[in-house]
Image (tube, rainbow, N blue to C red):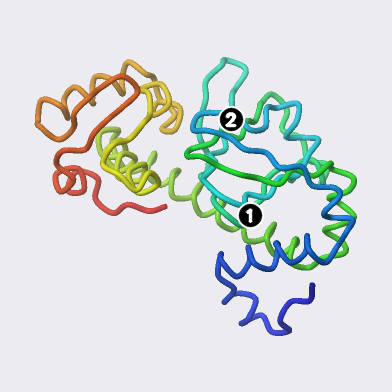
Amino acid sequence: MPLPNTLENHVAISDDELLEMLAKLVEEDDDMAAAISVVTALPLDCIAPADEISAYFYIIIDGLVQMLITSKEDRRLATAVIGPGAVFGEEAILDLAHPGLNYCAQAVKPSRLWKLPAEQAKHLLIKHPVLRLALLRTFGLRMVQVENRLEEVAYRWLPERLAAELIRQSRYAESDQIRLSHQALADILGTYRETISAILRDFREAGWVKLGYRRITILDREALEKMSGVIRE
């Protein structure tokens, strides 16, 4: 499917418009329709473990997905959260490798994705500019998120970062109730579960949150926002 001719129009394409263009590809290109298998995932499901993320290309149609890295020491870190219209699995089509690291794409909320084998995805990317646009947009989004997280690590102390992450997660969930374990929050922030648990207890004592099993309820959003400062996606 052709894209608009000007750079200005490329930049102006919204997520909804990009999704519409991707949907039309499936209607108009039998090869793409035949290559796609649909993947569904619930929160915390690992959509693409390390052995698959290097063999398939994924397009998010609904939901939210976070990219997790696991080091040789079994430490985990979330590097980005991406939504509809975004793609991942670029290792499969660009022949990239990350020695010593394992990647996993994990659902943040109920999600639906298209999954394409690497070789077929390569041919379709050459054939369809809209797929290349989706790839470039995702690269840009992930780079901005990584830069923002690095800035937070460098200049903000952990309680501020945790408060900001709770606000982010509530936005993703569209609710004051966040269904995440202390370990999952530790993974996102690149720290230890015990440290996160201690800070959350402080937040609870202050009356800012209520803690449950794999569940955190925000009671005082204004206090968390004041603690967190500027929150960037």
Residue hosting label 1:
139
- Along the polypeptide, which appears first: circle 1 or circle 2? 2
At 56% from the left and 32% from the top, the residue drawn is: 68
Asked if residue 177 lies left or right of residue 23, the reply is left
> In this view of the protein, which residue sits in the foreground, 102 or 104?
104
Identity of the residue drawn at 65% across and 45% down: 113
The answer to whether 199 appears left or right of 38 in the picture is: left
Label 2 secondary element: strand
Q: Is residue 174 above or below residue 208?
A: below
Q: Position of residue 15 (x, y in %)?
A: 56, 64
Q: Image check: 178 left or right of 80? A: left
- Picture coordinates of residue 171, whole percent (x, y): 35, 49
The residue depicted at 76 percent of the width and 44 percent of the height is: 57
- Name which residue type carries label 1: Phe
User: In the image, what residue type sits under mark 2?
Assistant: Ile
Along the line of sight, the residue nearer the viewer: 109 or 206: 109
21 and 150: which one is in front?
A: 21
